[in-house]
Image (spheres, rainbow, N blue to C red):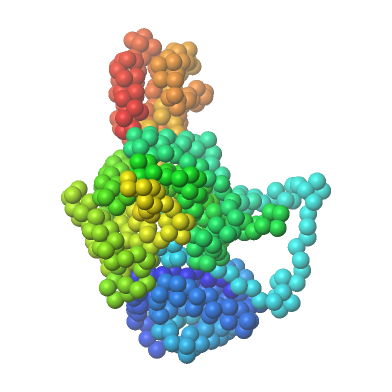
Amino acid sequence: MRIITLHCDYIKFKPLKKAIKQPEEIKEKEEKEMKECLVVLTAVEKGDNDRVVKELIEAIKKTASEVKTKNIVIYPYAHLSSNLASPDSALEYLVEAEHTLKEIGYNVVRAPFGYYKSFELRVKGHPLSELSKEFRGEEEDIKDFKKKPKVIELEEEPSKILRQLGRTKLDTSKIKESDHRILGQRLDLFSFNEAAPGMVFWHKNGLVILNELISYWRELHKREGYEEISTPFILDSRLWKVSGHWRLYRENMFITDYEGREFAVKPMNCPGAMLVYRSKTRSYKELPMRLAELGIVHRKELSGVLSGLLRVIKFTQDDAHLFVQEEELQNEITNVLKLFIEVLDKFGFEYSFTLSVRSEEKKDKYLGDDKLWNSAEEKLASALKKLNLKYEVVKGEAKFYGPSLDVVIKDSLGREWQCSTLQLDFNMPQRFELKYIDKDNKEKTPILLHRVIFGSLERFIGILLEHTNGNLPLWLSPIQVRIINFTDRNLKAAEKVLETLKKEIPNLRIDSDFRNTTVSDKVRDAELMKVNYLIVIGNKEEENGTLAIRARNSKPQFGVKMDDFVKELKEKIEKRI
Protein backbone atom coordinates (compact mmCIF):
# COMPACT_ATOMS: atom_id res chain seq x y z
CA MET A 1 0.00 0.00 0.00
CA ARG A 2 1.23 3.47 -0.85
CA ILE A 3 -0.09 6.73 0.55
CA ILE A 4 0.54 10.45 0.40
CA THR A 5 -0.73 12.49 3.34
CA LEU A 6 -1.50 16.15 2.65
CA HIS A 7 -2.38 18.55 5.46
CA CYS A 8 -4.83 20.87 3.73
CA ASP A 9 -6.75 24.06 4.33
CA TYR A 10 -9.51 22.34 2.35
CA ILE A 11 -10.30 19.74 -0.29
CA LYS A 12 -13.24 19.73 -2.72
CA PHE A 13 -14.04 16.73 -4.89
CA LYS A 14 -16.81 15.52 -7.18
CA PRO A 15 -17.27 12.17 -8.95
CA LEU A 16 -17.66 12.59 -12.72
CA LYS A 17 -17.89 9.22 -14.47
CA LYS A 18 -17.07 5.55 -13.96
CA ALA A 19 -13.40 4.57 -14.09
CA ILE A 20 -14.03 0.79 -13.76
CA LYS A 21 -16.85 -1.49 -14.86
CA GLN A 22 -18.36 -1.92 -11.40
CA PRO A 23 -17.52 1.08 -9.21
CA GLU A 24 -18.84 1.62 -5.72
CA GLU A 25 -22.52 2.52 -5.70
CA ILE A 26 -23.17 6.11 -4.64
CA LYS A 27 -26.44 7.92 -4.05
CA GLU A 28 -25.38 11.35 -5.19
CA LYS A 29 -22.69 13.00 -7.26
CA GLU A 30 -22.66 16.37 -5.53
CA GLU A 31 -19.39 18.12 -4.75
CA LYS A 32 -18.13 17.56 -1.22
CA GLU A 33 -15.80 19.74 0.78
CA MET A 34 -13.85 19.27 4.01
CA LYS A 35 -11.78 21.97 5.68
CA GLU A 36 -8.73 21.79 7.97
CA CYS A 37 -8.14 18.13 7.13
CA LEU A 38 -5.58 15.43 6.51
CA VAL A 39 -6.08 14.09 2.99
CA VAL A 40 -4.78 10.53 2.54
CA LEU A 41 -4.23 9.65 -1.13
CA THR A 42 -4.24 5.85 -1.08
CA ALA A 43 -3.32 3.07 -3.52
CA VAL A 44 -4.09 -0.48 -2.33
CA GLU A 45 -1.66 -3.00 -3.83
CA LYS A 46 -1.55 -6.72 -4.48
CA GLY A 47 -0.58 -8.58 -1.34
CA ASP A 48 -1.97 -5.98 1.08
CA ASN A 49 -3.66 -7.58 4.08
CA ASP A 50 -5.24 -6.75 7.45
CA ARG A 51 -1.83 -6.07 8.98
CA VAL A 52 -1.11 -3.46 6.30
CA VAL A 53 -4.47 -1.80 7.01
CA LYS A 54 -3.55 -1.61 10.69
CA GLU A 55 -0.24 0.02 9.74
CA LEU A 56 -2.17 2.47 7.56
CA ILE A 57 -4.47 3.41 10.44
CA GLU A 58 -1.54 3.86 12.83
CA ALA A 59 0.27 6.06 10.28
CA ILE A 60 -2.84 8.22 9.81
CA LYS A 61 -3.30 8.55 13.57
CA LYS A 62 0.34 9.54 14.04
CA THR A 63 0.35 12.17 11.29
CA ALA A 64 -3.09 13.52 12.29
CA SER A 65 -1.82 13.91 15.84
CA GLU A 66 1.31 15.74 14.68
CA VAL A 67 -0.63 18.22 12.53
CA LYS A 68 -3.40 18.42 15.15
CA THR A 69 -6.49 17.56 13.14
CA LYS A 70 -9.39 15.13 13.61
CA ASN A 71 -10.69 15.55 10.05
CA ILE A 72 -9.59 12.76 7.70
CA VAL A 73 -10.31 12.34 3.98
CA ILE A 74 -9.52 8.89 2.53
CA TYR A 75 -9.06 9.40 -1.18
CA PRO A 76 -8.50 6.41 -3.55
CA TYR A 77 -5.58 7.35 -5.79
CA ALA A 78 -4.51 4.54 -8.13
CA HIS A 79 -1.78 6.66 -9.79
CA LEU A 80 0.63 5.88 -6.93
CA SER A 81 1.21 2.27 -8.01
CA SER A 82 1.34 -0.06 -11.01
CA ASN A 83 0.80 -3.10 -8.77
CA LEU A 84 -2.83 -2.43 -7.80
CA ALA A 85 -5.03 -4.86 -5.89
CA SER A 86 -8.37 -5.99 -7.32
CA PRO A 87 -11.14 -3.37 -6.98
CA ASP A 88 -13.09 -5.56 -4.53
CA SER A 89 -10.11 -5.98 -2.19
CA ALA A 90 -9.12 -2.35 -2.42
CA LEU A 91 -12.61 -1.10 -1.58
CA GLU A 92 -12.89 -3.55 1.32
CA TYR A 93 -9.68 -2.28 2.92
CA LEU A 94 -10.58 1.39 2.40
CA VAL A 95 -13.99 0.86 4.01
CA GLU A 96 -12.33 -0.98 6.90
CA ALA A 97 -9.93 1.92 7.46
CA GLU A 98 -12.81 4.41 7.31
CA HIS A 99 -14.92 2.56 9.89
CA THR A 100 -12.00 1.97 12.26
CA LEU A 101 -11.02 5.64 12.25
CA LYS A 102 -14.61 6.71 12.87
CA GLU A 103 -14.88 4.30 15.80
CA ILE A 104 -11.89 5.88 17.53
CA GLY A 105 -13.20 9.42 17.19
CA TYR A 106 -12.12 10.81 13.83
CA ASN A 107 -14.37 12.73 11.46
CA VAL A 108 -13.85 10.74 8.25
CA VAL A 109 -14.96 11.30 4.67
CA ARG A 110 -14.10 8.73 2.01
CA ALA A 111 -14.10 9.74 -1.65
CA PRO A 112 -16.06 7.29 -3.86
CA PHE A 113 -14.12 4.35 -5.27
CA GLY A 114 -13.94 3.57 -9.00
CA TYR A 115 -14.74 7.02 -10.41
CA TYR A 116 -12.89 9.71 -12.28
CA LYS A 117 -13.13 12.73 -10.00
CA SER A 118 -12.40 16.42 -10.21
CA PHE A 119 -10.70 17.70 -7.09
CA GLU A 120 -9.22 20.89 -5.73
CA LEU A 121 -7.15 21.27 -2.58
CA ARG A 122 -4.82 23.72 -0.89
CA VAL A 123 -1.89 22.22 0.99
CA LYS A 124 -0.40 23.97 3.98
CA GLY A 125 3.25 24.99 3.95
CA HIS A 126 4.85 23.33 6.98
CA PRO A 127 7.36 20.41 6.82
CA LEU A 128 4.71 17.79 7.68
CA SER A 129 2.17 18.99 5.13
CA GLU A 130 3.33 16.56 2.40
CA LEU A 131 4.49 13.07 3.36
CA SER A 132 4.58 9.78 1.47
CA LYS A 133 4.68 6.27 2.95
CA GLU A 134 4.72 2.68 1.76
CA PHE A 135 3.51 -0.46 3.57
CA ARG A 136 4.17 -4.02 2.45
CA GLY A 137 2.31 -7.27 3.05
CA GLU A 138 4.22 -10.39 4.08
CA GLU A 139 6.42 -11.62 1.20
CA GLU A 140 4.78 -15.02 1.12
CA ASP A 141 1.40 -13.31 0.62
CA ILE A 142 2.54 -11.45 -2.47
CA LYS A 143 2.69 -13.54 -5.60
CA ASP A 144 4.49 -10.85 -7.54
CA PHE A 145 7.35 -10.82 -5.04
CA LYS A 146 7.86 -14.59 -4.66
CA LYS A 147 10.51 -14.61 -7.34
CA LYS A 148 13.48 -12.66 -6.11
CA PRO A 149 15.10 -10.47 -8.75
CA LYS A 150 18.18 -11.96 -10.35
CA VAL A 151 21.41 -10.28 -9.27
CA ILE A 152 23.31 -9.27 -12.38
CA GLU A 153 27.06 -8.91 -12.22
CA LEU A 154 28.20 -5.79 -14.06
CA GLU A 155 31.09 -7.55 -15.79
CA GLU A 156 28.74 -10.23 -17.12
CA GLU A 157 25.84 -8.25 -18.58
CA PRO A 158 26.51 -4.49 -18.66
CA SER A 159 24.24 -3.90 -21.65
CA LYS A 160 21.28 -5.44 -19.83
CA ILE A 161 21.86 -3.25 -16.78
CA LEU A 162 22.08 -0.16 -18.95
CA ARG A 163 18.79 -1.07 -20.66
CA GLN A 164 17.13 -1.53 -17.26
CA LEU A 165 18.55 1.73 -15.94
CA GLY A 166 17.67 3.71 -19.03
CA ARG A 167 16.52 7.26 -19.56
CA THR A 168 13.22 8.04 -17.88
CA LYS A 169 10.70 8.28 -20.71
CA LEU A 170 8.38 11.26 -20.92
CA ASP A 171 4.85 10.88 -22.30
CA THR A 172 4.56 14.14 -24.23
CA SER A 173 1.00 13.40 -25.38
CA LYS A 174 -0.43 14.45 -22.01
CA ILE A 175 1.44 17.69 -21.39
CA LYS A 176 1.58 21.11 -23.02
CA GLU A 177 4.35 22.38 -25.27
CA SER A 178 5.25 24.95 -22.60
CA ASP A 179 5.81 22.25 -19.97
CA HIS A 180 9.33 22.55 -18.57
CA ARG A 181 9.96 18.84 -19.21
CA ILE A 182 9.42 19.29 -22.96
CA LEU A 183 11.49 22.48 -22.93
CA GLY A 184 14.20 20.61 -21.04
CA GLN A 185 14.43 18.01 -23.80
CA ARG A 186 14.21 20.48 -26.66
CA LEU A 187 16.82 22.86 -25.24
CA ASP A 188 19.03 20.01 -23.99
CA LEU A 189 18.93 21.26 -20.39
CA PHE A 190 18.54 18.13 -18.27
CA SER A 191 17.41 14.51 -18.18
CA PHE A 192 16.32 11.86 -15.69
CA ASN A 193 17.47 8.26 -15.43
CA GLU A 194 16.19 5.24 -13.51
CA ALA A 195 19.67 4.87 -12.02
CA ALA A 196 18.78 7.82 -9.77
CA PRO A 197 14.98 8.36 -9.69
CA GLY A 198 13.89 11.89 -8.93
CA MET A 199 17.42 13.28 -9.28
CA VAL A 200 18.38 15.67 -12.06
CA PHE A 201 21.14 15.00 -14.56
CA TRP A 202 22.09 18.53 -15.60
CA HIS A 203 23.39 18.88 -19.16
CA LYS A 204 25.73 21.67 -20.23
CA ASN A 205 22.93 24.07 -21.15
CA GLY A 206 20.93 23.44 -18.00
CA LEU A 207 23.97 23.79 -15.79
CA VAL A 208 24.51 27.25 -17.26
CA ILE A 209 21.11 28.33 -15.90
CA LEU A 210 21.74 26.77 -12.50
CA ASN A 211 25.21 28.29 -12.19
CA GLU A 212 24.04 31.75 -13.27
CA LEU A 213 21.31 31.68 -10.62
CA ILE A 214 23.91 30.62 -8.05
CA SER A 215 26.27 33.45 -9.12
CA TYR A 216 23.43 35.96 -8.78
CA TRP A 217 22.53 34.50 -5.37
CA ARG A 218 26.14 34.71 -4.17
CA GLU A 219 26.51 38.29 -5.35
CA LEU A 220 23.38 39.37 -3.45
CA HIS A 221 24.36 37.56 -0.27
CA LYS A 222 27.91 38.92 -0.26
CA ARG A 223 26.48 42.43 -0.66
CA GLU A 224 24.05 41.87 2.24
CA GLY A 225 26.69 40.62 4.67
CA TYR A 226 25.91 36.88 4.66
CA GLU A 227 28.62 34.30 5.34
CA GLU A 228 28.36 31.35 2.95
CA ILE A 229 28.86 27.95 4.58
CA SER A 230 28.69 24.33 3.44
CA THR A 231 27.73 21.46 5.75
CA PRO A 232 27.92 17.65 5.29
CA PHE A 233 25.29 15.69 3.38
CA ILE A 234 25.22 12.87 5.96
CA LEU A 235 24.88 13.43 9.73
CA ASP A 236 24.59 11.23 12.82
CA SER A 237 20.99 10.24 13.59
CA ARG A 238 21.41 11.64 17.12
CA LEU A 239 21.66 15.13 15.65
CA TRP A 240 18.31 14.64 13.91
CA LYS A 241 16.85 13.57 17.25
CA VAL A 242 18.01 16.84 18.79
CA SER A 243 16.46 18.84 15.93
CA GLY A 244 13.18 16.88 16.10
CA HIS A 245 13.35 15.68 12.50
CA TRP A 246 13.92 12.06 13.56
CA ARG A 247 10.50 11.87 15.19
CA LEU A 248 8.62 13.99 12.66
CA TYR A 249 10.34 13.27 9.36
CA ARG A 250 12.25 9.98 9.64
CA GLU A 251 10.11 8.11 7.08
CA ASN A 252 11.14 10.65 4.45
CA MET A 253 14.87 10.39 5.19
CA PHE A 254 17.49 8.11 3.63
CA ILE A 255 19.15 6.12 6.44
CA THR A 256 22.60 4.50 6.37
CA ASP A 257 25.19 3.30 8.87
CA TYR A 258 28.91 3.56 9.42
CA GLU A 259 30.93 1.56 11.96
CA GLY A 260 27.86 0.71 13.99
CA ARG A 261 26.51 4.28 14.02
CA GLU A 262 23.25 5.30 12.32
CA PHE A 263 23.40 8.24 9.94
CA ALA A 264 20.87 10.06 7.76
CA VAL A 265 21.20 11.97 4.50
CA LYS A 266 20.03 15.47 5.32
CA PRO A 267 16.51 16.49 4.22
CA MET A 268 17.06 20.00 5.63
CA ASN A 269 20.11 22.19 6.19
CA CYS A 270 19.16 23.62 9.60
CA PRO A 271 21.05 21.26 11.97
CA GLY A 272 24.32 21.80 10.11
CA ALA A 273 24.00 25.57 10.48
CA MET A 274 23.30 25.12 14.19
CA LEU A 275 26.58 23.22 14.59
CA VAL A 276 28.49 25.97 12.76
CA TYR A 277 27.07 28.52 15.22
CA ARG A 278 27.96 26.23 18.15
CA SER A 279 31.54 25.76 16.98
CA LYS A 280 32.77 28.50 19.33
CA THR A 281 31.58 30.95 21.99
CA ARG A 282 29.64 33.79 20.41
CA SER A 283 29.48 37.44 21.45
CA TYR A 284 26.65 39.92 20.90
CA LYS A 285 29.16 41.81 18.73
CA GLU A 286 28.97 38.97 16.16
CA LEU A 287 25.20 39.31 15.84
CA PRO A 288 23.29 39.47 13.65
CA MET A 289 25.08 36.44 12.19
CA ARG A 290 23.78 35.54 8.74
CA LEU A 291 24.79 32.05 7.59
CA ALA A 292 23.77 31.17 4.00
CA GLU A 293 24.04 27.76 2.36
CA LEU A 294 23.29 26.30 -1.04
CA GLY A 295 22.65 22.95 0.58
CA ILE A 296 21.94 19.79 -1.39
CA VAL A 297 19.20 17.82 0.37
CA HIS A 298 17.43 14.50 -0.26
CA ARG A 299 13.84 13.62 0.65
CA LYS A 300 12.16 10.28 0.01
CA GLU A 301 9.23 10.57 -2.39
CA LEU A 302 7.05 7.93 -3.99
CA SER A 303 7.79 7.57 -7.69
CA GLY A 304 4.18 8.39 -8.56
CA VAL A 305 4.47 11.97 -7.29
CA LEU A 306 7.78 12.85 -8.99
CA SER A 307 7.25 15.52 -11.64
CA GLY A 308 10.24 16.80 -13.59
CA LEU A 309 12.01 19.61 -11.73
CA LEU A 310 8.88 20.52 -9.75
CA ARG A 311 8.94 17.45 -7.46
CA VAL A 312 12.28 15.72 -7.01
CA ILE A 313 14.18 13.66 -4.43
CA LYS A 314 17.49 15.57 -4.58
CA PHE A 315 17.48 19.36 -4.77
CA THR A 316 19.46 22.46 -3.85
CA GLN A 317 17.88 24.66 -1.19
CA ASP A 318 19.10 28.26 -0.85
CA ASP A 319 18.87 28.38 2.90
CA ALA A 320 19.92 31.10 5.27
CA HIS A 321 19.86 31.07 9.06
CA LEU A 322 20.03 34.41 10.81
CA PHE A 323 20.92 34.53 14.51
CA VAL A 324 19.74 37.81 15.97
CA GLN A 325 19.06 39.68 19.20
CA GLU A 326 15.46 40.73 19.79
CA GLU A 327 16.26 44.41 19.20
CA GLU A 328 17.75 43.52 15.79
CA LEU A 329 14.75 41.51 14.66
CA GLN A 330 12.78 44.32 12.99
CA ASN A 331 15.67 45.46 10.82
CA GLU A 332 16.60 41.92 9.75
CA ILE A 333 13.01 41.07 8.77
CA THR A 334 12.77 44.26 6.69
CA ASN A 335 16.05 43.51 4.92
CA VAL A 336 14.94 39.95 4.10
CA LEU A 337 11.69 41.26 2.63
CA LYS A 338 13.60 43.73 0.47
CA LEU A 339 15.74 40.87 -0.78
CA PHE A 340 12.63 38.83 -1.65
CA ILE A 341 11.19 41.74 -3.63
CA GLU A 342 14.45 42.45 -5.49
CA VAL A 343 14.80 38.84 -6.63
CA LEU A 344 11.16 38.26 -7.62
CA ASP A 345 11.01 41.57 -9.50
CA LYS A 346 14.13 40.50 -11.41
CA PHE A 347 12.18 37.58 -12.92
CA GLY A 348 8.92 39.45 -13.56
CA PHE A 349 6.69 37.50 -11.18
CA GLU A 350 3.55 38.84 -9.55
CA TYR A 351 3.50 38.00 -5.86
CA SER A 352 1.53 38.34 -2.64
CA PHE A 353 2.27 37.85 1.05
CA THR A 354 0.66 35.85 3.84
CA LEU A 355 1.44 36.19 7.54
CA SER A 356 0.82 33.03 9.58
CA VAL A 357 0.17 33.73 13.28
CA ARG A 358 -0.98 31.84 16.36
CA SER A 359 -4.52 30.84 17.12
CA GLU A 360 -5.78 32.08 20.49
CA GLU A 361 -7.68 28.82 21.00
CA LYS A 362 -4.55 26.67 20.61
CA LYS A 363 -1.92 28.69 22.42
CA ASP A 364 -0.75 25.67 24.35
CA LYS A 365 0.67 24.00 21.21
CA TYR A 366 3.18 26.80 20.55
CA LEU A 367 6.66 27.17 22.03
CA GLY A 368 7.85 30.44 23.55
CA ASP A 369 6.16 32.97 25.84
CA ASP A 370 3.31 35.29 24.87
CA LYS A 371 5.46 38.40 25.02
CA LEU A 372 7.99 37.04 22.53
CA TRP A 373 5.27 35.75 20.18
CA ASN A 374 3.35 39.03 20.22
CA SER A 375 6.57 40.96 19.57
CA ALA A 376 7.57 38.65 16.69
CA GLU A 377 4.16 38.79 14.99
CA GLU A 378 4.09 42.57 15.41
CA LYS A 379 7.57 42.94 13.88
CA LEU A 380 6.66 40.80 10.84
CA ALA A 381 3.51 42.85 10.25
CA SER A 382 5.38 46.10 10.83
CA ALA A 383 8.00 45.22 8.20
CA LEU A 384 5.27 44.50 5.65
CA LYS A 385 3.54 47.80 6.43
CA LYS A 386 6.82 49.71 6.32
CA LEU A 387 7.36 48.52 2.74
CA ASN A 388 3.69 49.19 1.83
CA LEU A 389 3.08 45.52 1.09
CA LYS A 390 -0.43 44.13 1.22
CA TYR A 391 -0.74 40.84 3.08
CA GLU A 392 -3.25 38.36 4.42
CA VAL A 393 -3.17 37.29 8.07
CA VAL A 394 -3.80 33.56 8.48
CA LYS A 395 -4.64 32.68 12.07
CA GLY A 396 -3.68 29.28 13.42
CA GLU A 397 -1.20 28.59 10.60
CA ALA A 398 1.96 29.58 12.46
CA LYS A 399 4.51 26.83 12.93
CA PHE A 400 4.71 25.50 16.50
CA TYR A 401 8.16 27.09 16.76
CA GLY A 402 7.26 30.60 15.52
CA PRO A 403 5.23 32.79 13.11
CA SER A 404 6.07 32.83 9.42
CA LEU A 405 5.80 35.02 6.37
CA ASP A 406 5.28 33.33 3.00
CA VAL A 407 5.46 34.73 -0.53
CA VAL A 408 3.15 33.30 -3.19
CA ILE A 409 4.26 34.01 -6.77
CA LYS A 410 2.01 33.91 -9.82
CA ASP A 411 3.42 32.81 -13.17
CA SER A 412 2.39 33.85 -16.69
CA LEU A 413 -0.13 30.98 -16.79
CA GLY A 414 -1.90 32.28 -13.67
CA ARG A 415 -0.68 29.45 -11.41
CA GLU A 416 0.42 30.17 -7.87
CA TRP A 417 3.61 28.84 -6.28
CA GLN A 418 5.03 29.25 -2.79
CA CYS A 419 8.80 29.75 -3.03
CA SER A 420 10.18 32.40 -0.68
CA THR A 421 9.51 32.07 3.03
CA LEU A 422 10.72 33.64 6.27
CA GLN A 423 10.15 31.81 9.57
CA LEU A 424 10.90 32.84 13.13
CA ASP A 425 12.06 29.99 15.36
CA PHE A 426 12.12 30.04 19.17
CA ASN A 427 12.51 26.25 19.33
CA MET A 428 15.71 25.19 17.57
CA PRO A 429 18.03 27.62 19.42
CA GLN A 430 16.75 26.07 22.67
CA ARG A 431 17.08 22.46 21.44
CA PHE A 432 20.65 23.10 20.30
CA GLU A 433 21.44 25.17 23.42
CA LEU A 434 22.63 28.13 21.35
CA LYS A 435 23.97 31.03 23.37
CA TYR A 436 25.77 34.35 23.04
CA ILE A 437 27.40 36.61 25.63
CA ASP A 438 25.56 39.94 25.83
CA LYS A 439 27.08 43.32 26.68
CA ASP A 440 26.47 42.66 30.39
CA ASN A 441 28.52 39.45 30.11
CA LYS A 442 25.40 37.27 30.56
CA GLU A 443 24.40 34.28 28.43
CA LYS A 444 21.37 34.76 26.21
CA THR A 445 19.63 32.67 23.54
CA PRO A 446 19.48 34.20 20.04
CA ILE A 447 16.29 34.31 17.98
CA LEU A 448 16.59 32.30 14.77
CA LEU A 449 15.27 33.29 11.36
CA HIS A 450 14.99 30.57 8.70
CA ARG A 451 14.83 31.98 5.18
CA VAL A 452 14.79 30.81 1.56
CA ILE A 453 14.35 32.90 -1.59
CA PHE A 454 14.27 30.44 -4.48
CA GLY A 455 13.31 27.54 -2.18
CA SER A 456 14.45 24.68 -4.38
CA LEU A 457 16.63 25.92 -7.24
CA GLU A 458 15.48 22.97 -9.37
CA ARG A 459 11.82 23.78 -8.78
CA PHE A 460 12.42 27.49 -9.37
CA ILE A 461 14.07 26.74 -12.73
CA GLY A 462 11.09 24.56 -13.70
CA ILE A 463 8.66 27.35 -12.80
CA LEU A 464 10.78 29.95 -14.60
CA LEU A 465 11.02 27.87 -17.79
CA GLU A 466 7.23 27.58 -17.94
CA HIS A 467 6.73 31.23 -16.93
CA THR A 468 8.93 32.38 -19.84
CA ASN A 469 8.16 29.46 -22.19
CA GLY A 470 11.92 28.94 -22.31
CA ASN A 471 12.58 32.53 -23.49
CA LEU A 472 15.13 33.29 -20.78
CA PRO A 473 16.71 36.73 -20.34
CA LEU A 474 20.14 37.22 -21.88
CA TRP A 475 22.11 36.74 -18.65
CA LEU A 476 20.50 33.34 -17.98
CA SER A 477 20.33 32.01 -21.53
CA PRO A 478 22.54 28.98 -22.36
CA ILE A 479 23.11 30.28 -25.91
CA GLN A 480 23.19 34.08 -25.97
CA VAL A 481 24.38 34.70 -29.51
CA ARG A 482 24.60 32.56 -32.64
CA ILE A 483 26.31 33.53 -35.89
CA ILE A 484 25.32 32.18 -39.29
CA ASN A 485 26.68 32.79 -42.76
CA PHE A 486 24.35 33.64 -45.64
CA THR A 487 26.39 31.63 -48.17
CA ASP A 488 29.69 29.78 -48.23
CA ARG A 489 31.28 32.94 -49.67
CA ASN A 490 30.59 34.72 -46.36
CA LEU A 491 32.12 32.00 -44.16
CA LYS A 492 35.44 33.74 -43.46
CA ALA A 493 33.72 37.04 -42.62
CA ALA A 494 31.32 35.23 -40.26
CA GLU A 495 34.24 33.44 -38.57
CA LYS A 496 35.98 36.80 -38.10
CA VAL A 497 32.87 38.26 -36.41
CA LEU A 498 32.76 35.20 -34.15
CA GLU A 499 36.38 35.66 -33.05
CA THR A 500 35.89 39.40 -32.50
CA LEU A 501 32.91 38.90 -30.20
CA LYS A 502 34.74 36.18 -28.24
CA LYS A 503 37.67 38.56 -27.76
CA GLU A 504 35.51 41.56 -26.79
CA ILE A 505 33.30 39.59 -24.36
CA PRO A 506 35.33 36.57 -23.14
CA ASN A 507 32.47 35.01 -21.14
CA LEU A 508 29.88 35.41 -23.89
CA ARG A 509 28.00 32.17 -24.62
CA ILE A 510 28.23 32.26 -28.39
CA ASP A 511 28.16 29.57 -31.07
CA SER A 512 27.85 29.33 -34.83
CA ASP A 513 25.91 27.48 -37.49
CA PHE A 514 28.00 27.27 -40.66
CA ARG A 515 26.28 24.19 -42.07
CA ASN A 516 25.72 23.88 -45.80
CA THR A 517 21.97 24.42 -45.60
CA THR A 518 19.48 27.24 -46.14
CA VAL A 519 19.37 30.40 -44.03
CA SER A 520 15.72 29.72 -43.19
CA ASP A 521 16.70 26.32 -41.73
CA LYS A 522 19.37 27.96 -39.59
CA VAL A 523 16.99 30.69 -38.41
CA ARG A 524 14.33 28.13 -37.50
CA ASP A 525 16.83 26.04 -35.52
CA ALA A 526 18.02 29.11 -33.62
CA GLU A 527 14.40 30.00 -32.78
CA LEU A 528 13.76 26.47 -31.51
CA MET A 529 16.83 26.76 -29.24
CA LYS A 530 15.55 30.13 -27.93
CA VAL A 531 18.79 31.93 -28.89
CA ASN A 532 18.65 35.59 -27.80
CA TYR A 533 20.50 37.13 -30.76
CA LEU A 534 21.06 35.68 -34.22
CA ILE A 535 23.70 37.42 -36.36
CA VAL A 536 23.50 36.86 -40.13
CA ILE A 537 26.56 37.71 -42.20
CA GLY A 538 25.86 38.20 -45.91
CA ASN A 539 27.45 40.18 -48.75
CA LYS A 540 26.25 43.60 -47.52
CA GLU A 541 27.46 42.96 -43.98
CA GLU A 542 30.82 41.74 -45.26
CA GLU A 543 31.26 44.78 -47.53
CA ASN A 544 30.12 47.39 -44.97
CA GLY A 545 31.63 45.78 -41.86
CA THR A 546 28.22 45.77 -40.16
CA LEU A 547 25.91 43.16 -38.65
CA ALA A 548 22.38 41.97 -39.44
CA ILE A 549 20.89 41.09 -36.05
CA ARG A 550 17.65 39.29 -35.30
CA ALA A 551 16.71 39.53 -31.60
CA ARG A 552 14.57 36.63 -30.44
CA ASN A 553 10.90 37.01 -31.46
CA SER A 554 11.70 40.30 -33.22
CA LYS A 555 12.24 41.57 -36.75
CA PRO A 556 15.84 41.78 -38.03
CA GLN A 557 17.91 44.97 -37.74
CA PHE A 558 20.37 45.77 -40.51
CA GLY A 559 23.50 47.89 -40.53
CA VAL A 560 24.28 47.46 -36.83
CA LYS A 561 27.83 48.50 -35.87
CA MET A 562 29.97 45.99 -33.99
CA ASP A 563 30.89 48.50 -31.24
CA ASP A 564 27.24 49.35 -30.57
CA PHE A 565 26.24 45.69 -30.36
CA VAL A 566 29.14 44.84 -28.01
CA LYS A 567 28.17 47.76 -25.75
CA GLU A 568 24.53 46.59 -25.65
CA LEU A 569 25.50 43.01 -24.80
CA LYS A 570 27.91 44.03 -22.04
CA GLU A 571 25.34 46.32 -20.44
CA LYS A 572 22.55 43.73 -20.47
CA ILE A 573 24.76 40.96 -19.12
CA GLU A 574 26.28 43.16 -16.41
CA LYS A 575 22.88 44.45 -15.26
CA ARG A 576 21.22 41.04 -15.71
CA ILE A 577 18.40 42.27 -17.94
User: Does residue 53 lie above or below 164 as drawn?
Assistant: below
* Observer-nearest of 298 and 227: 227
Quadrant of the rendered image containing residue 574: top left
Q: Quadrant of the N terminus?
A: bottom right
Frontmost residue, 343 versus 248: 248
Q: Front-most of 45 and 534?
A: 45
Q: Quadrant of residue 151?
A: bottom right
Whether residue 180 is visible here, answered yes or no, is no
Q: Quadrant of residue 227?
A: top left
Return the x and y of residue 359 as percentages of the image width and height.
29, 71
Circle count: 0
User: In the image, 462: left or right of 354?
Assistant: right
Q: Is residue 497 above or below residue 264?
A: above
Q: Residue at x 29, y 76 (%)?
A: 361
* Residue 116 percent across, percent down from the top left: 45, 74
User: Which residue lies at the image location 46% right of the left edge and 60% below the top edge?
Assistant: 431
How far across and how far down the image is residue 383, in percent? 22, 51
User: Which image quarter holds the C terminus?
Assistant: top left
**Residue sitting farthest toward the right:** 156
Q: Residue at x 74, y 47 (%)?
A: 159
Residue 303 in view, yes or no: yes
Task: Give the farthest residue toward the front.
Answer: 441
Q: Position of residue 30 (x, y in %)?
A: 34, 81
